[in-house]
Amino acid sequence: MLEQVIVAGRTCRLFGSERPACVLIQPSARHENKTLEAEAAMIADCSKLPFVLATIELEDWMADLLPWPDGNISRDPAAGHRALDTLDYVLLSLVPELQRRYGPLPMILGGYSLGGLFALWTSAQTDSFVAIAAASPSVWIRDWIPFARIHPPLADKVYLSLGDQEERVKNQAIARVGDSLRAQYALLQEQLGPGHCTLVWEQGNHFHDNEGRLARAFAWCMEAYAFS
């Protein structure tokens, strides 16, 4: 771990080079803290480009990341109402702090599960990120594909991945994830062009090799942007 800092009242962790060529930003649940250093090491193994990974520790994963309410994901009344607050924090507090430390570098936003969904949703709100790394994103949320159809990403590159067992579940809402991700990928090919997006099928269910999947997602985005 390079450094733990408090930015506008939130804990952020910085991993990687002190002189990065790009900055990776990732919302992080507390249970992921123990794997973040391994994830950063795997990103470094996958790409020789120097980087810094900046992670944001969230208080409430669903409330802070879900872009709108969906009872199939959470019945918590707070869920689906604070994603815009999280985005404002990233753009108005975290990004300026990272730019102060490292300069005006290209930034990549990524996440796993709801973090991946948040990254995709964010890409339709701002052009602040050159690429989006969405590993096993929760695109089975209701009305996601209609939203994605009329809100194309403002990022130039998008990486999608999913475990090959994730759609093979009894919960019918979650089982939509495979078809939804295929639809998302087809939209991205139309919106960005085939060379600007990719869909990777990983092995296992939703809880297998999370940090490895996200490391590969970030590394692809770094390489795709740097050599495009």
Image: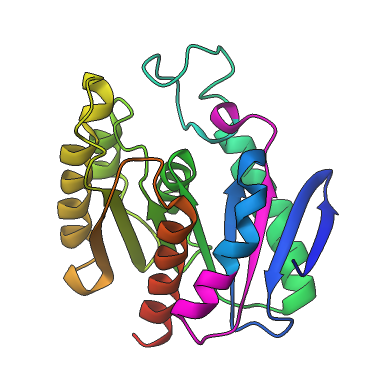
Q: Is residue 49 above or below residue 170?
A: below
Residue stretch rendered in magenta on the structure: 41-63
Which quadrant of the figure contains the C terminus?
Answer: bottom left
Left or right for 41, reference 173: right
Residue at 65 percent across and 82 percent down: it is 20
Q: Position of residue 98 (x, y in %)?
A: 73, 67
Horizontally, residue 58 falls left or right of residue 24, namely right
Magenta stretch holds residue 60: yes
Residue at coordinates 44% horizontally, 73% vertically from top-left? Answer: 219
Q: Nearer the viewer, residue 177 or 107?
A: 177
Count of numbered labels shown in the rendering: 0
Magenta includes 155? no
**Res 227 quadrant in image:** bottom left
Depth check, front residue: 144 or 74:
74
Q: Relative to 72, is 45 above or below?
A: below
Q: Residue at x 40, y 81 (%)?
A: 223
Judging from the image, the colouring scheme is: rainbow
Instruction: Locate residue 149, reporting x and y percent.
Output: 23, 43
Residue 73, image quadrant: top left
Q: In this orientation, which residue lies closer to the viewer: 154 or 225?
A: 225
Task: Pinpoint residue 87: horizontal percent, then vertical percent.
Answer: 59, 45
Could you say where residue 222 lies in the image, as x and y percent from the top left?
A: 45, 76
Could one spot residue 24 in this view of the protein? no
Residue 41 or residue 107, whichever sits in front: 41
- Quarter residue 17 falls in: bottom right
Residue 194 shows up from this direction: yes
In the image: residue 142, left or right of residue 48? left
Q: Quadrant of the N terminus?
A: bottom right
